[in-house]
Amino acid sequence: MASRKKSAPTKAAARKSAAKKKSTSARSARRAPTDSGPAQLSDAGAEDPAVQQGLDAQALAAAFDHNPTKAAEYGRENALAPPEGAHVTPTPLAGASTLTEGQTSPKTGTQAAPGTNPTVGPLDRVRVDSGGQFLTTNQGVPVAQNQDSLKAGLRGPALLKDFILREKITHFDHERIPERIVHARGSGAHGFFECYRSLRDITRAAPFQEDGKVTPVFVRFSTVQGERGSKDTARDVRGFAVKFYTDEGNWDLVGNNIPVFFIQDAMKFPDLVHALKPEPHHQMPQAASAHDTFWDFVSLMPESTHMLLWAMSDRAIPRSYRMMQGFGVHTFRFVNEAGESRLVKFHWTPRLGTHSLQWDEAVKISGADPDFHRRDLWEAIEAGEFPEYELGVQVFTEEQANKFSFDVLDSTKIVPEELVPVEPVGRLVLNRNPDNFFAETEQVAFCTAHVIPGIDFTNDPLLAGRIHSYVDTQLTRLGGPNFHEIPINAPVAPVHNNQRDGFHRQAINRGRVAYEPNSLAGGCPFQAGSAGFVSFPEPVRGEELRGRPEKFAEHYNQATLFYESQSEAEKAHIVGAFRFELSKVTVPAIRERMVANLMNVSRELATSVAAGLGMGSIEASPRALARVPRPEVRQSAALSLLAHPGDGSIRTRKIALLVCDGVNGESLAATQQALFEAGAVPRLVGPRIGPFVTAEGETLQADASMENEPAPLFDALVLPDGERAVKMLAVDGRAAEFVKEQYRHCKPILAPGASSTLLEGAGASKMLEDGTRDPGIIAGVEDDDEAIAAFIDAMAQHRHWVREKDPPLV
């Protein structure tokens, strides 16, 4: 047979071969690490696009070992001639959102050309790359300075004509609908505020005018960064917003559970939230700050360092909304009938004390019950265990404030209680759940602009932006200018003005007059004169500048104060939080920059964090202020959670009592009754729900199981006595896990009689490393009453951090 000649490849075959090569290349690229996890950056394998992108990102970030223009943000001369922002032109690959941008189609078009903004074609026309370009307004006007709002003098009020701030904030306010951009996930409750004594000598504000005066309120607690469907127990700042329905109108005290903030000027708020939210190219991670863009931003904004210490502390993972403080954050004014003003800061302190979760525990709770805080608040109020908080105020004069080493207009600073004590002035009680979540909790509109006579603003530049931003946000979120007529937002004081019409108008005004002055309605409604809101006449004189006072340039003293005021356990948790968050950062230079900032706070803190990240020695980053002022206070006991233990009770604490067939029913009943009488919430938890038979032949019902309510959901654990029950649970891995979780999270454990073997089987020692007894484990006590009393005392301590080890022993 004649041999066949080898034919040349057809066009179709060539295309198939090329496609196969391309597919192989794509598979290779997919095997490379992405920014979902830390990349191992080295020149080896640099031909892989993912590796090269990581190398390029590292090179860019490494060019910024600190923020070189930070020192030039302060003082008059810098405000008059702001410097060009530090920048490095990125490579095209470093600026790419995805390695697959080469996969084109008639719809997607091609990748963006660096540094251009084309306006024609397919989606190419809207792809913008800003590498090497000036920052501009939406009208293309170059922005000379993007750090400060326009003020009358460096400490003066923000000016309404600041079109750059207004455009930036307004656009930010309307980025998302219909949920809130921040504080989207919330829980609310009705209640009242009761004034302890009249404060007429310092303020004419309605809630403080009489001894025992009661003002109705609505309170909304929230997380900041997550969306409406996110989890409750994320590491985050918590909102603590109170709407006072006073007889002179609504006053909204819109605060947080942390008394400081990340930034000093509202101009930076959109930047902060954009950096904090899920990264826009892949919308991850949700409700988490542990990612590149957040730490890139804050490491270049050293004024954030103080807030970062609070956010990495246990304050950011509270045990309950009922067990966290609240703060007004800003410095406000009290103004009395005579028009005299004093400066004031607001503090809420819970009656149950300030208590937190452990990070490992918070993560596990989020999977077992994402509604943990919302459920806790609702159930406590339904049970008649009404949450209560005490309002305290720090009141001081302008003269006092001028002598502080820091500026009270700087929202990244506190006024230490050693300088100005907190004076209790009233109590807040939450005693009624909403009838409908949407109508009340979701539609409630808090605005920092909502003040009443006797409460006024200072020139805090962050507060100035919030005054505009909150109202502007509600216009879109709640459908127009009449959001004040939604029932939950309506005041109890009468409303009479000439505003008419608009979306969702409820009021039906009679007559033909909607203007003032008028004669056709007898001049009504007429201005109230001195009986109405009169702004405090703070003297204003200054040049129109974008800048901040030089006092704002000290960024680390109060961060050091906070760290040095923590207990050893709290310090260890701060180190662990920084270690976890920064381990999620994929660009090493960002981690190094942040640790360099921490070196200015505490060498102990920074070296501990660096060691946990496998980093070598790090030099402290340059400070924005050459001469560091001497702090008035170096340690403040009030800054530790342990300073507010609460009333010493165990009311509303949730305790798991493990049960199984053969449990000693008499011992169990005595424990359960004692816990009930102490105000706790004991739950019978079995291998399954349903009936179990005690050693005495009685039947009891378990309403929870180790499967549907795991250990992190409980504040303490009671193990069962009874040899048969202990033997059955000893071979159930879930019971061992229950003990391990309670032990690891430093919670109290009661182990009567034979149940001590369950402790040993789980590796939970009754002794500490130093040979002393673990105060949180009550075992080997023969007298039941004595054991129960000791267990209740142990629970009153909340946690026994002396047991904690890093890494954990169990």
Image (tube, rainbow, N blue to C red):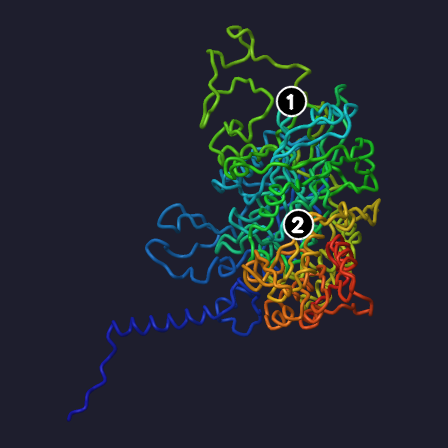
Q: Is residue 279 left or right of residue 639?
A: left
Near-viewer residue (32 or 503): 503
- Image vertical order of residue 14 relative to residue 408, above or below: below
Q: Amino acid at mark 2?
A: Met
Determine which of the numbered discs, if any, sits on residue 301 in the image: 2
Q: Position of residue 485 (x, y in %)?
A: 52, 27
Q: Earlier in the sequence, mark 2 or mark 1?
A: 1
- Image vertical order of residue 131 relative to residue 805, above or below: above
Near-viewer residue (786 or 263): 786
Q: Is residue 795 left or right of residue 58?
A: right
Disc 1: CA contacts within 10 A as few (<14), some (14-19) or many (>=20): some
How far apart, in angstroms, are the residues tagged by discs 2 and 1?
41 Å
| Residue on which the image places disc 1 | 248
Q: Amino acid at mark 1?
A: Glu
Residue 300 makes an appearance in the image: no
Residue at 56 percent of width and 66 percent of height: 55
Near-viewer residue (500 or 632): 500
Given this view, does label 2 or label 1 mark the residue nearer the observer? Answer: 1
- Location of residue 205 (image quadrant): top right
Callout 2: helix, strand or loop?
loop
Residue at 64 percent of width and 65 percent of height: 695
